Image (cartoon, helix red, strand yellow):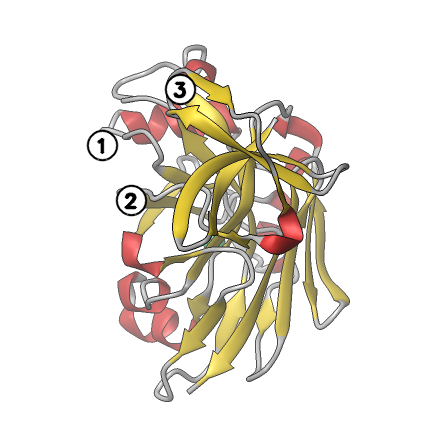
Amino acid sequence: MKIGRFEVGGKSRWGVFDVDDGIVIPVKGSIFGDFELEDSSFKIEDVSILTPVVPSKVVCVGLNYRDHAEELKMPIPDEPILFLKPSTSVIGHNSAIIAPSFCNRVDYEAELAIVISKVCKNVSPSEAEDYILGYTCLNDVTERNFQKKDGQWTRAKSFDTFCPIGPWIETELDWRNLKVRAYLNGELKQNSNTNNMIFGVYDIVSFVSKIMTLLPGDVIATGTPPGIGEMKNGDEVVIDIEGIGVLRNYFIKE
Ligand code: MG
């Protein structure tokens, strides 16, 4: 099932997206608890797709693909390397990624994102699946020069609009063998598979939950494969993850 948020007539709502029929069906209740489908529906083309959740935080894993570590000639980490993106960096499908003029090199990073379903603290890897609502696409937009210069990544990763997520959450998905792709202006730039992940989804959720309490709607980005690259003013960037869908955004350099 594909669930997310949309806006129509100035009102934001949760809904279930039926991509084959091109419709979204509003839901009554909470996507984090019990909900029912309403009798009405809208054409997807007639609504604005919003961020599928409003996370309190976005936790990210750095360097989690074997093929990317080899590309960078970096050793395989023995524990996940974590950093945060602020909630204010989150934008949805079809929104603009906007980089201030003092940014120099702004890159896309295609990532599978985990969406948390309920309060999650100190869970084991075998328990982690119970705390996952589903999966979405995420673009871990990064100012590469600031990342290198600062020695830590807060400035590089945290600009407003630097965390596109969406277009919706797929709740029934086996994360272990999914194609992860990024396209820049239609050209394939990243092309890997989640089977190259160093740390799997359940190990990551468990690891993060032993550090901080994860809340419903929180997002964990699982790292990017090889092929990251720079966006220029006016570029279209697409993150396409098998079984989820296509997250499309535009890059604006101020
Ligand atoms: Mg990343």
Identify the mark at residue 131; answer none if there is no mark: 3
Mark carried by residue 57:
2
What amino acid type should be assigned to the residue bearing mark 1?
A: Met
Q: Tell which circle, 3 or 1, labels the residue nearer the N-terminal end.
A: 3
Nearer-the-camera pick, 201 or 171: 171
Residue at 71% x, 39% y is 19
Q: Is mark 1 within 8 Å of ligand 1?
A: no
Question: How far is mark 2 from mark 3, CA to CA?
Answer: 16 Å
Name the secondary structure under disc 2. Answer: loop
Residue ID at (56%, 71%): 250
Q: Position of residue 55 (x, y in %)?
A: 32, 42
Question: Could you give the CA–CA distance between mark 2 and mark 1, rounded to whole angstroms?
Answer: 11 Å
Mark 1 and mark 2 in contact (Cβ < 8 Å)? yes
Disc 1 is placed on an element classified as: loop
Of discs 3 and 1, which sits in the foreground?
3
Q: What type is the residue that disc 2 sits on?
A: Lys
Q: As shown in the figure, which amino acid type bears the numbered disc 3?
A: Tyr
Of the pair 185 and 82, the residue shown nearer to us: 185
Q: Secondary structure at mark 3?
A: helix
Q: Position of residue 30 (x, y in %)?
A: 37, 25
